[in-house]
Each structure stands twice: as structure tokens, then as C-alpha cells.
Image (cartoon, grey):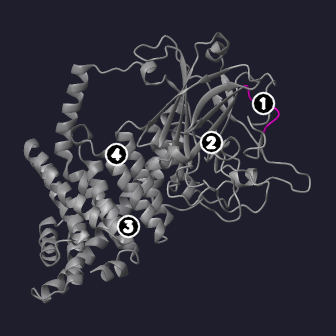
């Protein structure tokens, strides 16, 4: 069974693409009635409860969300993490930096006046992470151009924008301080999203900090290194080979001890961090990132400005309409091909009159599923499960078929059906081992999670995680970049359903970066274009 999946699931472009598009169409169309019912529930609850949260309680209005590429936590291009088991891959990978408006007169919080900054990482790792944020708060040209310990991390800052205030967050220290060492105060640090999000709240009760309320723009230097209590200012050393207490991949004593840094979009991290000169004994100079201090459209996870969200003018609408027509034609062609495949496979399957082997049964089950013959498909998957109850492919598709019945059932019955579906889907995910099995199990559960009502089941975040896991598995078998980007866009859609616009923005940007300049399916281009991201 596994060998059959390996031969067919990734080698056939049709099966690989139809696996996702066909399942998506079936899931969304099959649960429409129940979605309408749940939408009424959600609107009713919202109107009755009149839920509203004070911005001061949640950190203040978001002024800016700045994104950093995922997977660039290799510093100057070749750094590797220390070998200690707590250094989980992604723990030092900055993916997002969120700056809130400074808050005053906040209620029900320890500090009535504060400024919230949030760093999001690819994975948890507070026990091994050292965070630095240096801020030019006024742009007057005064301040410092070297870090707190100029011999620690091996970098300096743009002399046009010296820093006024610095923030250090490590397992042993959380402090906000001035460049001249005349001011220092502890900061509150919280963790969220299972340790992947670090929330920093700077108290602003001191009058000298009240100028931040009037600032329109600040400039920031933001980066992360590996933490150790035995090195200068907590930055773990880097050498040629990694060890438990030091990173690897360094080929010069001037290599910065920084794994990830937030930079302006057009600037390459490896180029900046490798710009030392051993002959002249010069070290890399980090450029500042400009941050607006008042809320704007940059806070919603979409791009703005000349490189961002496009205006909804005639040209954009015309292109979207063109893509919708192309998308419809592509869907029709896929359906026609699926029908032809089913006819061929069905003839072979019927001719054997119950003597088909497991490979042909799976082929027939998939072909029937793709043409929406769910009864025939389910019967074939039942045969596979009777032979092997732990078959993750059969379990995954059976779960999706059961979920589809929810669209035709009464609300109470539908809830029971969806719960039953997840028993199959969850088991499929837990049993999947090969990349192809992981892709199949994760995508089935992901599309069901995306289709069912979020107000009732709350599965959208799990759907996002499944899409991301499927994308990783696709990348491991060198799949079409458009398929990987498509999974990221689907993950972003799930994050949007949960209200996590910033996380959605991360994966929309990653999808745009991956397929930039490539020819992609019209559905993928349209999904990105409607959210303000171009593929060309």
C-alpha cells in the first residue's frame, strides 16, 4: 500500500493537484447548509453579547506589523544552532514584529501607561533566546551606534539613526534602558501561542518617556541570538563547528553572533551580516527599520504602499475577473479529466469482480472521491480498512466523507457527524509516517477544518497548522512551489477565520516570495491578488 502511494501520489501531477482542489470543492459545497445555520448563530451571539475589548487591555491599537522571512535563522548565511537539545529549529527565527500605539489610562492592567512590542518566532525557545531591540525614538541624531556591550554580538548601527533606548530580554533579564545609562526599568514579558510569541510591555510612567506619545515615526534595530549565561552579554559564541554551548558555521572571528535580524524588505540579511572586513577590522552595520507609531492599514496583515495592496481600480478588478474565468475553465478541465480517469479505473475494478488488490482498490476509491461518488468511494475505503484498520490514507478520506454528510443533515446530527469525522481524521494524522501519507492526512483534516463553521467547532487554527505541516511535507519531496504556496495561502485563510490577521500576513508574504515571477494556477494568483499580493 505504501509503495503504491509513493509511486502515484507525487509522480502524477493530476492526482497531486486534484487531491487538493477536488477535496476543497467537495468540502465547501457539501457543508453549505450547515455553514449558513452556524452563521446565524454567530451573528446572533455577537448582537446579543455586544462584545468589545478595550485596546488598552489588549496592548493598544496595532501601529505596525513588520514581517521577516521564515527560515532565515542562519545569521550571515551559514550559522547553525548549538547542539543542545533545547535549541529547537526555529526558536531564533523571527517571523513578525508588531508595534502597538503607546497606551495611557488603561484599566484593569498593572500599568496604566505602557508601550507594547511583540516578537513572534517560528518556534518556542525562551530558555535559549536572547532578544535585542534598540530604538531611535526622536530622530535627532543623538544616541549610541554600538550595542550595550560593543564587544558582544559583533555589529554596529546606522550612524544616521543612533539609538536612544534599548530592550534586553533573556531568561535572566528583562530591562528597558537609555543609551547614556541614566535610566533603566524592568519590563513585563509574557509568552503566548505556546511560547512562540513574546509580548513586551514597557512602562511609560516616567515623564521623560511621554514624548513617545507624540512620536509619529521611530526606527528600530531588532535581532535575536543564542543565549548562554557564560558569554559576553549572553550571546553564545559561534565557531566552525557547533557544540552544546556554541553555534557553528562561522568562518571568521568577526562573524556576528546573531541568528536573525529584522531588516527593510529590500535588504538581504546574509549580505548585511557577512559584510565584515578582517583586513580593516570593520564589523557589519545594521540598517534601521522605520516604524510608524499610529495605527494604519499596515496592521491588518495586508501590504500597503507602492509594494503593497493594490487599489481596487478597474485594472485590478479586470485581472481578478480574468482569473476567475480561467479558474472556472481549469476546474472544468480537471472535472472532465477526473471523470475520464474514473471511467477507466472503474472498468478495471469492475472486471475483477471483487478480486482487486489493495493498490487498485485505493486507485478506485480516490477516483470515485474525485468525481463525488462518495458512496462508492466510502465502500472501497471500507475494504481497505477491513484489511488494515491503521491505513492513514483510507482513514483520512473516510473522515472527509463523513464530514460531507454534515452538510445534508440537521444541525444536531451534523455536530455528531463532524465529531465522528474527526475521530478518523485525527487517527489518520497520528498514523501518517511517509511524506505522502502526511500530505494526504493533513490536507484532508485541514480542508474539513477550513470548511466547517468556526463559530461552532473552532477548528480553523488546527486547519492552519495542518496546512503548514502539509506544506513542509510537500517541500521535503520537492513538490511544485505552487502547491507549497497554495497550502500557505490556505493556512492564511484559516488564520483569518480565527481573527489572527498578523499570522495570516506571515504566510501570505511567504507564498508571494516563493512564487514571485512564476506562472501559477489562477486560483492561487487570485487568492493572493485579492489580499494585495502580486505574483509577478
- Do the residues under discs 2 and 3 have CB atoms within 8 angstroms? no
- Which of 442 and 296 lies nearest the eye of the viewer? 442
Q: Distance between the residues labelled 4 and 1?
A: 40 Å
> Dot 4: what SS?
helix
Instruction: Tell me, yes or no, if residue 152 can be seen here.
Output: yes
SS type, badge 3 = helix
Write down the residue under mark 3: 17
The residue labelled by disc 1 is 162
| Cα gap from disc 2 to disc 4, whole angstroms | 29 Å
Residue 56 against residue 354 in the figure, above or below: above
Magenta residue span:
157-164
The one nearer the camera, 132 or 356, is 132
> Is residue 163 rendered magenta in the image?
yes
The disc placed on residue 461 is: 4
- Name the dominant secondary structure of the magenta segment: loop
In the structure shown, which secondary structural element does the residue marked by tag 1 occupy?
loop
Which badge, 3 or 4, comes first in the chain's sequence? 3
Q: Label 2, on which residue?
A: 307
Amino acid at each position: 500500500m505504501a509503495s503504491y502511494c509513493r509511486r502515484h501520489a507525487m509522480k502524477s501531477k493530476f492526482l497531486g493537484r486534484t487531491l487538493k482542489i477536488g477535496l476543497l470543492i467537495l468540502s465547501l459545497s457539501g457543508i453549505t447548509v450547515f455553514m449558513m445555520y452556524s452563521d446565524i448563530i454567530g451573528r446572533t451571539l455577537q448582537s446579543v453579547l455586544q462584545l468589545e475589548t478595550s485596546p488598552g487591555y489588549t496592548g493598544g491599537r496595532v501601529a505596525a506589523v513588520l514581517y521577516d522571512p521564515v527560515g532565515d535563522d542562519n545569521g550571515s548565511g551559514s550559522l547553525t544552532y548549538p547542539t543542545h537539545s533545547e535549541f529547537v529549529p526555529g526558536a531564533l527565527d523571527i517571523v513578525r514584529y508588531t508595534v502597538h500605539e503607546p497606551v495611557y489610562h488603561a484599566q484593569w492592567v498593572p500599568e496604566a501607561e505602557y508601550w507594547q512590542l511583540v516578537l513572534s518566532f517560528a518556534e518556542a525557545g525562551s530558555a535559549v533566546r536572547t532578544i535585542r531591540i534598540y530604538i531611535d525614538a526622536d530622530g535627532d541624531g543623538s544616541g549610541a551606534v554600538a550595542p550595550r556591550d560593543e564587544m558582544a554580538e559583533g555589529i554596529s548601527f546606522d550612524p544616521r539613526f543612533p539609538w536612544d533606548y534599548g530592550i534586553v530580554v533573556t531568561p535572566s533579564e528583562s530591562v528597558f534602558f537609555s543609551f547614556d545609562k541614566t535610566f533603566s526599568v524592568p519590563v513585563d514579558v509574557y509568552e503566548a501561542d505556546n511560547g512562540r510569541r513574546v509580548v513586551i510591555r514597557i512602562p511609560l510612567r516616567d515623564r521623560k518617556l511621554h514624548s513617545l506619545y507624540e512620536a509619529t515615526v521611530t526606527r528600530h534595530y531588532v535581532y535575536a541570538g543564542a543565549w548562554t549565561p557564560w558569554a559576553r552579554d549572553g550571546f553564545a559564541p559561534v565557531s566552525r563547528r557547533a557544540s552544546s554551548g556554541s553555534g557553528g558555521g562561522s568562518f571568521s572571528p568577526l562573524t556576528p553572533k546573531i541568528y536573525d535580524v529584522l531588516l527593510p524588505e529590500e535588504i538581504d540579511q546574509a549580505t548585511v551580516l557577512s559584510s565584515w572586513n578582517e583586513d580593516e577590522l570593520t564589523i557589519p552595520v545594521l540598517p534601521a527599520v522605520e516604524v510608524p507609531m499610529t495605527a494604519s492599514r499596515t496592521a491588518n496583515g495586508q501590504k500597503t504602499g507602492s509594494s503593497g495592496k493594490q487599489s481596487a481600480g478597474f485594472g485590478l478588478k479586470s485581472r481578478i475577473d480574468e482569473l476567475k474565468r480561467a479558474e472556472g475553465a481549469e476546474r472544468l478541465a480537471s472535472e472532465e479529466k477526473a471523470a475520464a480517469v474514473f471511467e477507466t479505473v472503474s472498468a478495471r475494478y469492475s472486471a475483477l469482480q471483487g478480486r482487486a488488490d489493495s493498490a487498485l482498490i485505493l486507485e478506485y476509491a480516490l477516483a470515485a472521491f474525485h468525481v463525488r461518488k462518495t458512496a462508492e468511494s466510502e465502500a472501497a475505503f471500507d475494504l481497505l480498512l477491513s484489511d488494515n484498520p491503521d491505513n492513514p490514507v483510507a482513514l483520512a478520506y473516510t473522515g472527509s466523507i463523513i464530514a460531507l454528510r454534515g452538510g445534508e443533515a440537521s444541525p444536531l446530527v451534523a455536530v455528531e457527524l463532524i465529531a465522528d469525522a474527526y475521530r478518523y481524521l485525527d487517527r489518520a494524522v497520528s498514523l501518517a509516517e511517509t511524506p505522502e501519507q502526511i500530505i494526504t492526512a493533513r490536507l484532508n483534516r485541514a480542508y474539513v477544518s477550513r470548511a466547517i463553521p468556526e463559530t461552532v467547532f473552532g477548528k480553523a487554527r488546527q486547519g492552519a497548522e495542518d496546512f503548514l505541516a502539509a506544506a513542509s511535507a510537500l517541500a521535503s519531496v520537492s513538490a511544485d512551489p505552487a502547491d507549497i504556496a497554495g497550502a500557505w495561502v490556505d493556512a492564511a485563510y484559516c488564520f483569518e477565520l480565527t481573527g489572527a490577521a498578523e499570522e495570516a500576513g506571515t504566510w501570505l508574504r511567504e507564498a508571494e516570495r516563493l512564487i514571485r515571477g512564476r506562472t501559477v494556477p489562477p486560483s492561487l494568483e487570485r487568492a493572493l491578488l485579492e489580499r494585495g499580493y502580486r505574483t509577478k
